[in-house]
Amino acid sequence: MQLPNITEGKFQEEDMQMTMPIGFMGMNIGPTELLVILAIVLILFGGKKLPDLARSLGRSLGEFKKGKDEGEKLANEKVKEIVDDIKKEEPGKVEGPKV
């Protein structure tokens, strides 16, 4: 993973992107395993609870994404403030963005 370029005042998405396989111990889940897991969930929760479960999962993911976006926005603002302060104090030490 590369360190982000803070001279631009914001993190680029590709700078912070990490890949993580879905599964246990680094093994990917295939379509067969996914069907088995869904069958087990159906047996455990029943057909009546699945819509409620899916709805709450969707809401949770939406809240998570919203919180992540707010955190990224706050971090970008703080980095920009720090870079601007450094530019004011010692303008020769901070490079501008490379075009």
Image (cartoon, rainbow, N blue to C red):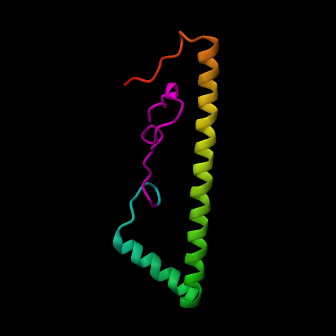
Could you tell whether 9 is left or right of 98 in the image?
right
* Residue 39 in magenta stretch: no
Percent x, y of residue 16: 48, 40
* Residue 19 in magenta stretch: yes
Percent x, y of residue 41: 52, 80
Percent x, y of residue 47: 53, 89
Q: Which quadrant would residue 76 be assigned to in this image?
A: top right
Decide which of 83, 1 is in the foreground and name it.
83
Query: As displayed, is residue 75 above or below residue 97?
Result: below
Percent x, y of residue 36: 42, 78
How many discs mark residues in the rendered view?
A: 0
Which quadrant of the rendered structure holds the C terminus?
top left
The majority secondary structure of the magenta stretch comes to loop
Q: Which quadrant would residue 51 be assigned to in this image?
A: bottom right
Q: Residue at x 46, y 38 (%)?
A: 12
Query: As displayed, is residue 57 above or below residue 21?
Result: below
Q: Residue at x 56, y 12 (%)?
A: 91
Q: Residue at x 49, y 28 (%)?
A: 8
Which quadrant of the rendered structure holds the N terminus?
top left
Q: Residue at x 64, y 20 (%)?
A: 85
**Magenta extent:** 1-23
Decide which of 93, 38 is in the foreground and name it.
93
